[in-house]
Image: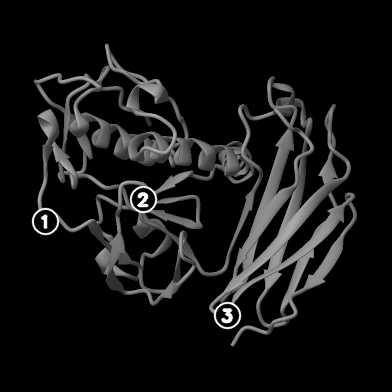
Amino acid sequence: MWFWRGDYSEGCRGTTDGSLLEPDPQDTGCSDLGFRELYVRWLQYATFLPLFRSHGTDASREVWRFGEVGTPFYDAIVKYIRLRYQLMPYIYSLAAQITLNSYTMLRAIALDFPDDPNTFDLIDQYLFGSALLICPVTKPMYYQRNSIPIRDEPKTRCVYLPLGSRWYDFWTETIHEGGQTNVASALLDTLPIFVREGSIIPMTQVMQYVDEVTDAPYEIRIYRGADARFTIYEDEGDNYNYEQEAFALVSLSWYESCNQLKISSRQGFFSGLVTERQYDIIFISEEGRETKTIIFKGDELLLSSAKPYM
């Protein structure tokens, strides 16, 4: 269910009542560094929503209005736009699961961790799919409205990591125990994101639009520590032919105990299907990264990591 609350104006303020960012009666415009910071935080949050669209009433949204290349607001905005495109294989596959299996892309944390009562009242964190724990920043840390600097404000955010899993910091790949509150970095260009151990996240290269390079390699990130499964979904991307089963599925299964990745044979077909694609498999663990590259041609493959995970 969607609740449309109308177009937001330029001036906004952060809240902690579950609504994240609310309209403010005073519009100050893009020259206001407080608004620039707010917009960056809005965009970071929106990167991990089903619909990624910068929209508003009389609000400056073009990236070049926020500075130039090499300046903090501009660079932070570009960073998350690029990340959104990199995550398209993951996001599009999640969207398919809504249609195929009645899944939910945005998940209250208690849905996946019902045995952890600390998750029941978490209103400012959520799961984006089963893998990503998203923790939006909901208060200013650098500037108030009218470009007034904020002094001595920690650039951090408290994040509760649910009990029942360990969690990788998306940016540093350090691992943290669940069932505790972690103080995470929340610099201007850093949205706190954590990845559940036992997750598979398919990614691709940065693009200007989603089908700019249809045969681009996939980066398959495997966050080790537990078994993991993910199904990559592909279709023509610009029509309703998927309703006539014009799509393809590739299931990925990671078995932690035997240190092995199984890539299933491709199921299905559609016009324009890329029959051979490079997969850069990245095994992520406490010991660091290990990368293996294969060319997937549609047939089942078994691949082992060279590093047993202790």
Specify whether 20 is left or right of 217: left
Depicted 90 relative to depicted 71: above or below: below
Residue 165 visible in this rendered orientation of the protein: no
Image quarter hosting the N terminus:
top left
- What is the number of the mark on residue 287? 3
**Where in the figure is residue 49, as x and y percent of width and height?**
43, 38
In this view of the protein, which residue sits in the foreground, 118 or 288?
Answer: 288
If the image is split into quadrants, where does the C terminus sit?
A: bottom right
Q: Residue furthest bottom?
A: 310
Depicted 37 relative to depicted 189: above or below = above
In percent of the image, x 39 and y 40: which residue is there?
76
- Mark 2 belongs to which amino acid? Leu
Q: Are marks 2 and 3 in contact (CB under 8 Å)?
A: no
Rounded to the nearest angstrom, the CA distance separating label 1 from label 3 is 35 Å
- Looking at marks 1 and 2 on the same chain, the residue that comes earlier in the sequence is marked by 1
Position of residue 110 measured from the top left corner of the image (x, y, whole percent) = 35, 59
**Of labels 1 and 3, the one closer to you:** 1
Above or below 210: residue 266: below
- What's under tag 3, amino acid-wise? Glu
First in sequence, mark 1 or 3: give its number.
Answer: 1
Q: Secondary structure at mark 2?
A: loop
Q: Nearer the viewer, residue 134 or 282?
A: 282
In whole angstroms, how far apart are the C-alphas of marks 2 and 3? Answer: 24 Å
Residue for point 84% across, 37% down: 274
Q: Secondary structure at mark 3?
A: loop
Mark number for residue 152? 1
Taking 170 as reference, is 99 left or right?
right
Query: In the rendering, at what x and y percent does residue 52 appear?
Result: 45, 30
Please give the residue where the numbered disc 2 appears in the rendered image: 191
Instruction: Identify the amino acid type marked 1.
Output: Asp
Residue drawn 31% across and 47% down? 188
